[in-house]
Amino acid sequence: MSASRERAIDALRSEAAGCTACDLYERATQTVFGEGPPSARVVFIGEQPGDHEDIEGRPFVGPAGRIFDDALGDAGIDRDTTYVTNAVKHFKWTPRGKRRLHQKPNAREIRACRQWWEAELAAIEPDVVVCLGATAAQAVFGMSFRLTQHRGEWQWLGDRRALATVHPSAVLRAGDERDAVYAGLVADLELVARRLEDPDS
């Protein structure tokens, strides 16, 4: 089973590398597809790759990725056992001097990429899906979903459990509230850890 899932993910990754479903591919360095074991029981879906991810071609390897790794560790989840991807696979940015600043993807760009994360979930068949940030949550649960109202609450996504929490980048932007935002992220990830240990929890 794991081998067939791995072949399916590899095929999707190769196909997505040439995706032109929206205009974002024109300015991005490359498609940043998901990564992790095809047998992962939990899939994390973020918003889109950032500058570091666009260059390296891997999800969550920049500053927010380091926060994510720390939060997973503090919650008792081994990142190497998880599959991590994004709702949008190309980096959307605007120039600011020599820097490339993140821009929020629009509804059309999010819809164009829906095929990829849906195919990833279909191939992996995880027990749990976690949306990181409002954009990912709305991509998965619908535009009416409000992270401020429903973060940390279990939802149904088809026949599997799903949950939305803040994106790790929110910790970087939190200023004096950084410790509190980080603690909230870890608390939500602890819910995920408990669900993986006991599906009936």
Image (cartoon, rainbow, N blue to C red):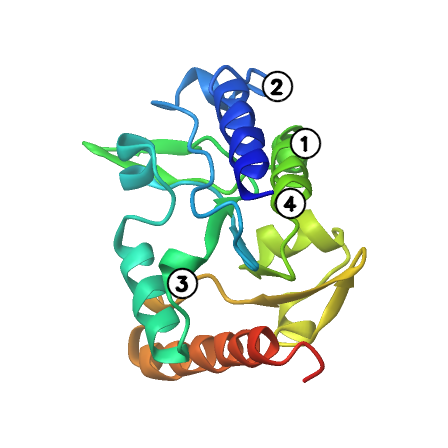
Please, what is the three-letter code of the amino acid marked with disc 1? Gln
Q: For marks 1 and 3, give the CA distance.
A: 24 Å
Residue designated by label 2: 21
Closer to the chain start, of discs 2 and 1, is 2
Compared across the picture, whether 85 is left or right of 198 comes to left
Asked if residue 56 is positioned above or below residue 21 in the image, the reply reads below
Residue designated by label 4: 121
Label 3 sits on a secondary structure element that is: loop
Q: Residue furthest right?
A: 158
Q: For marks 3 and 2, give the CA distance.
A: 27 Å
Q: For marks 2 and 1, give the CA distance.
A: 10 Å
Closer to the chain start, of discs 1 and 3, is 1
**Mark 1 or 3, which is nearer the eye?**
1
Find residue 168 and name its label: 3
Asked if residue 124 is positioned above or below residue 108 in the image, the reply reads below
Closer to the chain start, of discs 4 and 1, is 1
Q: Position of residue 65 (x, y in %)?
A: 32, 55
Please report the residue visible at 66 percent of the width from the left and 50 percent of the height from the top: 125
Q: For marks 4 and 1, give the CA distance.
A: 10 Å
